[in-house]
Image: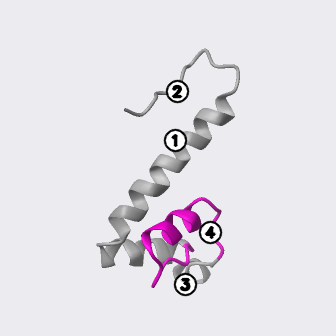
Amino acid sequence: MVATPDPQDDHPEADLEQVNDLLARWAARSAATSAALIERFEAMGYAVRGKSEDEIADVLHRPPTLRSQTASE
């Protein structure tokens, strides 16, 4: 069972990091089997094409590094 963040916690950064990790892993698991999701992440600036599920999760933990092609138009 996953612990839920405590709103009375003195360290909300830890809760935010935990939620971010869970979301990155969930998104990576979904992207590993979805070409459309890979395309969407790539368009948002996340270089995930050709990466494993663990590598995608790692990429999603960081800000996007590539500019979207549509952003320059």
Callout 4 crowding tier (Cα within 10 Å): few <14, some 14–19, many ≥20: some
Q: Secondary structure at mark 2?
A: loop
The reply to whether discs 4 and 3 touch (Cβ–Cβ < 8 Å) is no
Q: CA distance from mark 1 to mark 3?
A: 29 Å
Q: Which residues are magenta?
A: 45-65
Q: CA distance from mark 3 to mark 2?
A: 37 Å
N-term mark: 1 or 2: 2
Residue 22 in magenta? no
| Image vertical order of residue 4 relative to residue 33, above or below | above
Q: Which residue is mark 3?
A: 69
Residue 52 in magenta? yes
Q: Which residue is mark 1?
A: 19
Q: Secondary structure at mark 3?
A: helix
Q: Residue at x 45, y 56 (%)?
A: 25
Q: Secondary structure at mark 1?
A: helix
Q: Quadrant of the C terminus?
A: bottom right
Q: Where does the image place residue 64, in percent across and percent down from the top left?
A: 62, 69
The colour scheme of the drawn protein is: one colour
Q: Secondary structure at mark 4?
A: loop
Q: Residue furthest front?
A: 1
N-term mark: 1 or 4: 1
The reply to whether discs 1 and 3 touch (Cβ–Cβ < 8 Å) is no
**Which amino acid type corresponds to the residue marked 4 in the rendered image?**
Pro
**Which amino acid type corresponds to the residue marked 2 in the rendered image?**
Pro
Q: Which residue is mark 4?
A: 64
Side of 14 where 20 appears, left or right: left
Closer to the eye: label 3 or 2: 2
Side of 55 where 1 appears, left or right: left
